[in-house]
Image: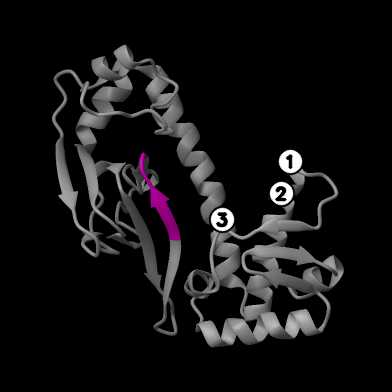
Amino acid sequence: MKEIDFSGCPIMSSLPGERIKNLFEEIEFKINTYKKGDIVARQGSPCKFLNILLAGSVKTEMVAENGSVMTIENITAVRPLASAFLFAENNIFPVDVIATDFCRIISIPRDEVLKMFQKDAGFLESYIKYNSNKTQFLSTRLQTLNIKTIKGKLAFYILEGLNKNLVQNPGSSKFRMDRNQTELAKYFGVSRPALARCIAEMEEENIILIEHKEVKVINRVALQNLLG
């Protein structure tokens, strides 16, 4: 396993290299490659392997009730893919996984992952912690999807971003978005023109000010009122 670098992988980064090497001794796995645009996994397909993105990046997408496609998450190496669903009773992919550039993915069968848990309790602990944190992310994402209005979705996204920034910058009224308007529209499952209109209206109402990806919150109370 010397040729594979797991540094930065949240389910293995706490383990020394020798322990990672030992984990893979007598373990079956395969490595697949994908080019940009390839489908790595389809929504609803069985999740039978622990897939870890070793190189490249993917996006996960879901079809909304209105037929629009929403981007759930952009993932860059080195990260597990849908690891929380591997041991679920209904173990299927909840999203489409699509390569956004050239990717290398290692796939470890479910039974082999169980052997790895038995070999190293530290790996098991890291796996559980990662998936617990992932559940929190999915919970937040679900809240976004449940908000019906575009302004409400945008307000929730801005407040989440601002609160995260306040941890490192107390008192700040600004934060930098991790998506441009096109990406944000797809994240919300709406058209870009519709999102642009909402942003313009919220700026006219002196609620926010957006320049490129920099967001300044002018009226936080008004933002919170949009959630209801």
The CA span between labels 1 and 3 is 23 Å
Residue corresponding to mark 2? 165
Residue 64 image label: none
The CA span between labels 2 and 1 is 6 Å
Taking 186 as reference, is 146 left or right?
Answer: right
Camera-side mark, 3 or 2: 2
Q: Identify the image quadrant of the N terminus.
A: top left
Measured as percent of width and height from the top left, residue 188 is found at: 53, 73
Tell whether label 3 touches label 1 (CB within 8 Å): no
Which amino acid does the dot numbered 1 rest on? Gln
Residue corresponding to mark 1? 168
Residue corresponding to mark 3? 139
Q: In the orientation shown, which residue stands out farthest toward the top? A: 18
Determine whether 202 is above or below 62 in the image: below
Kindly identify the residue that appears in the image at 55 percent across and 73 percent down: 181
Camera-side mark, 1 or 3: 1
Q: Give, as a single range, the part of the protein colored magenta.
A: 73-78
